[in-house]
Image: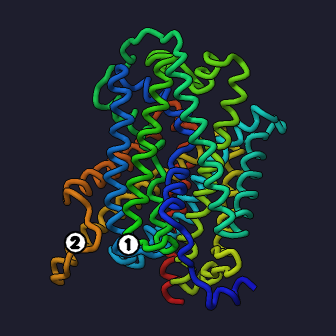
Amino acid sequence: MVLRAAVSAAPRQLLSVTDGVFLTVGMIIGALIFKAPSTVAGATSGTAEFLFAWLLGGAVSLCGALVYAELAGRHPDTGGEYVFLTEGLGKGVAFLFAWSRMTVIQTGAIAAVAFVFGDYASEILNLGAHSSAVWAALAVAALTLLNFAGTLQSKALQKTMEIALIACLVLFSIAALAIGGSPVKETPAASGSDGGSFGFAMIFVLLAYGGWNEAAYLAGEVRDGRRNMTRILVTGVLAVTALYLLVNLGFLAVLGHGGIRESKAVAADVMRAIAGEKGALLTALMVCVSVLTTINAAIFTGARTTYALGRDFRLFRLLGAWRETGSTPANALLLQGAITLALVGAGAATPDGFNAMVAYTSPVFWTFFLLTGVTLFCFRFQDRKRNKPPADINVAFYPVVPLIFCATCAYMLYSSIDYVRNPVFGPKFGDAVLAGLAIMAAGIPLYWVARKK
């Protein structure tokens, strides 16, 4: 029934600007706002540099959002980066991206965030020796089925969870600022505040901001996508930047820069200072809601690339089925869920499922992020060569903004590979990095097979 419906079915423009902003915010806000501040504090010299890192992360993300706004305005179609890479660098690069996103980038990211959900859900109800993996698998399966049921159902849940999460974070921050605490005296970080240390901090800041690009996959389902994608991307990034600054100000008010650096669970320590031991349970619930919003939005957008791959290559034509009932890429969702569950199982066999999935996905992710930024320069060059008029949406301060974005992507690609040399991280998760790169490379011969078909 799915395949028969797909013959005449196509994505419908069911999403408003508000829906797009909620999905964008949901993709960005995740567990890292509860995990990253300690690492960032440890790599910065004081409060000012700590806050500057978070502000800079928002500024870099805004540069990327402006680049993606022009790209989405030029090609407002379901598929996001897949469409941009197809038009800018050719079908071969786009195929390799779609293959990597299906097997490494998106599925690995969903699995990573699902492990964070599992860790915090286990604090509420432990399910045994592999409790975290069991909770992770349950979350992936349940939200995949919800998205399979329909776009309207998944976006309604997204709005509900987002409203609850934002309200919790705002109340949490205001309470922390109002009540305060006994901040630990600020002392310089052990490694100082050199550029390398600050750069290490930015790795985790940008990870916390990651996900805004997912809005580009909604372009084909947003009403008046050419005009509204800029509003969605810019509003989403600005909203998260303001929220992250507010949350970190709350952390500083209670623990101080030194206390954040020494904390292993900064949000839990802040809640413990405000509300006692019962605050730990409230923190676990808040983190669970946060992570579920991220998983739901990632599942929603991830399947759109796989759908575009199936639409363009006969070898994967079953994945190009669009289910009229519910308006969803049904087969793509089911395959994405199956791969993610397999990665959850693989991650459960490692010392830390979350870190294993980050190592698995990061180098591949930043490779294609950089290539997507390059496509904007390709489009501009083609416009000049053909004497085409300017696009409806143009990135501000061209070429400075896209150059900043591309330079950041190149640095993050280097860092995600170089991080494996870390004496603590490398021995445990170096194989995960190699596995991700190997699976990406496997897409090259597969492309030639798909091309012949």
On screen, residue 37 versus residue 299, left or right, reads left
Quarter of the picture holding the C terminus = bottom right
The N terminus, quarter of image? bottom right
On the question of residue 74 being in view, the answer is yes
> Looking at the picture, which amino acid does disc 2 mark?
Arg
Which of the 4 quarters of the picture holds residue 280?
A: top right
Q: Is residue 385 left or right of residue 246?
A: left
Residue drawn at x 37%, y 21% as measured from the top left: 47
Type of the residue with mark 1 = Arg
Element class at badge 1 = helix
- Which of the two labelled residues, at mark 1 and mark 2, occupies the earlier sequence position? 1
Q: Which residue is mark 2?
A: 380
Q: What crowding class fits label 2: few (fewer than 14 Cα within 10 Å), some (14-19), or many (20 or more)? A: some
Task: Name the residue at the right extreme.
Answer: 128
Residue 194 locus on image (x, y percent): 29, 26
Give SS at disc 2. helix
Mark 1 — residue? 226
Indicate the position of residue 276 as horizontal and vertical percent values: 69, 16
Tell me the colour scheme of the image: rainbow
Residue 125: which numbered mark, if any? none
Q: Is residue 60 above or below residue 55?
A: below
